[in-house]
Amino acid sequence: MKVIYQHLPPVEIAGRKLVGKVLIGLLVLLSAVVGATAGLLLVYSTDLPQVEQLEHYRPSSVTELYDVQGRVIGTFALQRRVVASYDDYPQVLRDALVSIEDKDFYRHSGINLWRIVGAAYRDIESGGKVQGASTLTMQLARNLFLSPDRSFYRKVQEALLAIQIERRFTKPQIFTLYANQIFLGHGAYGYEAASEYYFSKPAKQLKLEEAALLAGLPKAPQYYSPIYHPDRAIKRRNLVINSMLEDGKITAAQAAEAKAKPILLNLQKDPNTLAPYYVEEIRRYLEAKYGSDQVHEGGLRVYTSLDMDLQKAARQALLDGLTAYERRHGWRGQLANVTALGQKIDKYDDPDWDEDPEVNGYVHALVTEVSANAAQIRFDSRTATLVTSDTAWTKLKVPNIFKVGDIVYVKVLSLDPGGKAHVSLEQDSGAEGSIIAIDNATGEIKAMVGGRDFNLSKFNRATQSLRQVGSSFKPYVYTAVIDQGGSPDETILDAPVTFQTASGPYSPHNYDQKFEGTITLRRALAQSRNIPALKLADRVGIRTVIDYAHRFGVTANLPPYLPVALGSGEITLLEQTSAFSVFPNDGVRIAPRYITKVTDYEGRVMEEDFPDIRDVVSARTARIMTSMLREVVLHGTAVAAAKMPFPLAGKTGTTNDFTDAWFVGFSPTLTCGVWLGYDEKKSLGGKETGGHAALPIWMQFMNVALAGKDPGEFQPPPHVPANSVAQKVDTPDVAPGDGETH
């Protein structure tokens, strides 16, 4: 078509031609820009992840362990995260986060063009890289799918992903994903975990000033840490509060009140410190069965048999018992000194200080100053003074005990305001111990302490340490005799005897170097006489005795030598304690167990543990043995426990040279075992018998464990007429070795 300009002036014709050329040029330029942009978007989007994955997204979360009352006793996690729902986050937290991070969150479609343009202009003006202006959705896209690199390329990808996310998910869903994912410092991921860590309460209970503090952390969690930098944290918190005021989310009065409040943290205690040996046993089991990734990232819920209250009582009893033992043997000195180790006193930090000190707890402290009559010490941020009365038991003067830089072991008697404490000087010479408690009816392990200090040694002396059990093995000998028709009222001769063995004559003796003559089996066990036990074991056969021990659940390899009857064999505390629970259970063994149920992230049951029950001996035998072990408490080597107001029974155990001290005993409902010794199997010292060293620990624990509860009653034993089975013990069956014990 031909355009005719014949009626137009020449100047107007030229102008119209110029406008046409400009329009054509602009169209070409626009097409080029659109094409280039489309090309760039195509390039930037070719390797973008599929946001559809978010529909099935499950962040790494904490595996939690619960005690029998649902209290958390331990966690396993690579990231401390507790996944919460949208409704779990209170309105005040939502408002605070949106006000400071993304005011238009509920209005935009993933990106905020005006913020991006403004941020880009500022970055170009300053010569920096493109940064800032990210919406919550863009931050979510970056945290989930992209690297933290701040570049134009990554920013475009972030925006594209944000748009896709907004198209697929609602605002509450996006907020929840963000709130569960974001890092908030000190290993806490997500606001639920952060609320529990910083304030020891769920996010639903956050106050305005607390919510504002947490909302200000995503910008720079370490820089604004309320723990390390409270001054920065409070400024950032107040900035959040001001933003909320500007947005009309709070009133001026509320803002002023919140900003006037100091930061009050209530840091969550590490639950793993209550029962670390127990938790470690469970960790090894779970990792072996489900794999490390599932355990540390899968958010399992593990329901255990532990009772937190009994665990605390067991730990206290063991530590107090070790303290009493240390004091009986006097001050040994040889304190470690940080200066001698090449460390600076003002920089020293002890592993004990990672936990908050507790009254009646024990902690290692640092000596910072010594005078003629006192020593100044500190543990973490607390200080205390040790004066002459605190150290009187050492029979030494203060300057002869301490020097600056020494690491001392103290018991916390009180914690005073202002960081002061009152402590008593104690000692850690290396003596160790363990204690375990098992519910008779279920086999559930209610308490377990595997050593004095998990920070110093992860070795679990309750489950991993094979130790000679001394006379606590004798009940297996008497069980074999009773089970084969014997009677506790039969008599046996406690007199010198020599057993002819392959390696020569074996002439054992009793602990007190005396002989009682003709005594009943009941008294022989109660007084832990060695000669009668050896005669009985020889009569029924040591292999038969060992077979009975195995039936009770002892898995250790016990050599068929006669001294095994006196406890020369090595058994773990767990197996020995579990075995003793057969007696109050009418001869039934219930295998010990840690876990009752495990569920996955969705709450589906992965395993449910039911008691493993089997018959060991007849009810008749079990009841007779219980009555005989009751005699040990009433009139025997454990008579110190006779004053306790509960029906109790058990057996002491002491090995040669006093290297191991045992007491394993039970009530109708609970069985508890205690062991004391050194890891290197050296002597505890003269007269440190099971009744002297281990029994007091057992008594302290059982007094707490049974207080206020119905202890039940032991089933009465049947009447068993005496016969001559025990009196036939004259001729020994040879067995080499030596194992005189008590």
Image (spheres, rainbow, N blue to C red):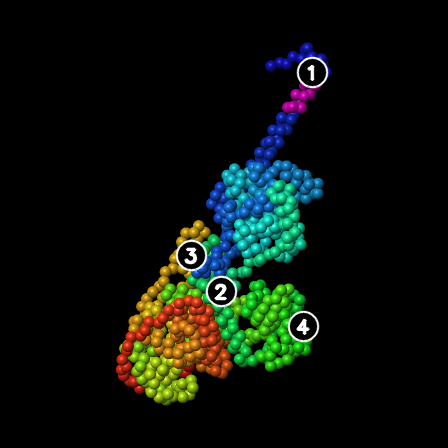
What label sits on residue 275 in the rendered view? 2
The structure residue drawn at horizontal position 53% and vertical position 40%, both measured from the top left corner, is: 171
Crowd rating for badge 4 (residues with CA inside 10 Å; few <14, some 14–19, many 20+): some
Relative to 195, is 389 above or below? below
Q: Which residue is mark 4?
A: 369
Tell me the CA gap for discs 2 and 1: 95 Å
Question: For the residue marked with disc 2, what is the amino acid?
Answer: Ala
Tell me the CA gap for discs 2 and 3: 19 Å
Quick check: marks 3 and 4 in contact, CB under 8 Å? no
Relative to 582, is 72 above or below? above
Examine the rendering and report whether any part of residue 338 can be seen.
no
Viewport quadrant of the C terminus = bottom left
Question: For the residue marked with disc 3, what is the amino acid?
Answer: Val
Residue 23: within the magenta? yes
Looking at the rendered structure, the secondary structure element under dot 3 is: strand
Between circles 3 and 1, the one closer to the viewer is: 3
Examine the rendering and report whether any part of residue 513 can be seen.
yes
Ranked by sequence position, the earlier of labels 3 and 1 is: 1
What label sits on residue 598 in the rendered view? 3
Judging depth in this view, the residue of 495 and 683 nearest the camera is: 495
